[in-house]
Amino acid sequence: MKKLIIITLAVGMLAQTGFTQNKMGQTGAQFLSVASDAWGGGMAEAMTIIEMRSASLLFNPAGMARMDARVDIMASQNQWIADITHNLFTMAINPAGGKYGVFGASLMTVDYGEMQGTMVWQNDKGYIDTEIIKPSAYAAGVGYAKSLSDKFAVGAQIKYIGLNYGRSVFPDEDGNADTVKSHIAFASAFDVGTIFKTGWHSLAFGMSVRNFSDEVKMEKESFQLPLTLSLGIGMDLFDLFRDSMGDQQLQIAVDALHYRSHPEQLKIGLEYRPVDLLALRTGFYTSEDENTDSFDENDLTFGLGIQQFGLEFDYAYTPKGVWNEVHRVSARFSF
């Protein structure tokens, strides 16, 4: 276990070196930074220490390690800004009650909608219309998590990413159509994380590194994936008053995130469960711009979950200012 702890910390330090160069605005595949899960969306994505079964592959794969169900399946849709749609599917299998760990898989697809393609042309308008462009992207991953003791769990995921930004026409020197080229790129990325339970009530610490990879090249330009380092802490606050609170739960989670693509964020999530079948969620996250002293178009988030007989439905609402709002819905099934 000591060796694995050292390896995990080393990966975190190695990932930190990836932030030493200022890559603000120079990352691609930003859909990898979007949390499409409604459970996470309702808690402002402060999920580093939250054990979410198969959905933990989105935030911290170590969250799968203590899954008590044999199989967990989750499907989610995220109606993102600018009519972008994210579809997500995750699955986890616990073949022997955790003895051999938990195996998981994830698939995210992104539909950016349609847009009219154009190209420069020698006419009055200076351009002509070409075909309708339908850009898309996907990320497919396989993961593994293991609880090494009653306090410490580790997890990792390997992802394969595909980007398709449509086709374009390259004119010759006279402005006539010459070559049609498809703009596609592929990459692989690695996620790793840990969760440590202190033993004092339900207090836990967590760490995750997401989207660690080499540079991706498309045509003549190279870009980085949105590498993210997350440190989290959280607990059920009602553990402090368990005798008077009964079975009620009030989970608080706080994440500090360091990004390659934009300034740091602090995320705070709350989940109140008055009874097992109902969860009420809210959260808040900020990202102050050092240059403009302004905040992102993010404010409070809201969500709820209803579960019974191993089936759970989650919904999350996130206001986005001038971008209107974001709606996420998820369905989960465990047995």
Image: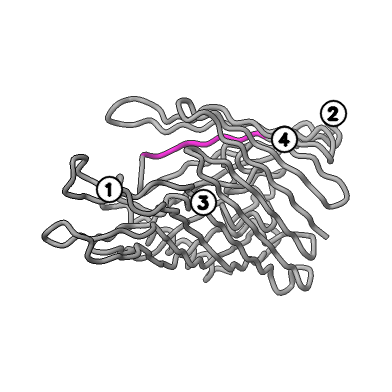
Q: Which residue is mark 4?
A: 304
Q: Which mark is residue 128?
A: 1
For marks 3 and 4 on the same chain, the one whose residue lies earlier in the sequence: 3
Considering only vertical position in the picture, is 305 above or below 333?
above
For marks 4 and 1, give the one nearer the viewer: 1
Check disc 2 and report the residue beneath it: 244
Sequence-first disc among 4 and 2? 2
Instruction: Indicate whether residue 258 is drawn in magenta.
Output: no
Q: Position of residue 9 (x, y in %)?
A: 46, 61
> Residue visible at 55% across and 46% down?
85
Dot 1 falls on a residue whose secondary structure is: strand
Alpha carbon separation for disc pair 4 and 1: 48 Å
Q: Which residues are magenta?
A: 263-270
Q: Nearer the viewer, mark 2 or mark 1?
A: 1
Label 1 near label 3: C-beta < 8 Å?
A: no
Predominant secondary structure, magenta span: strand
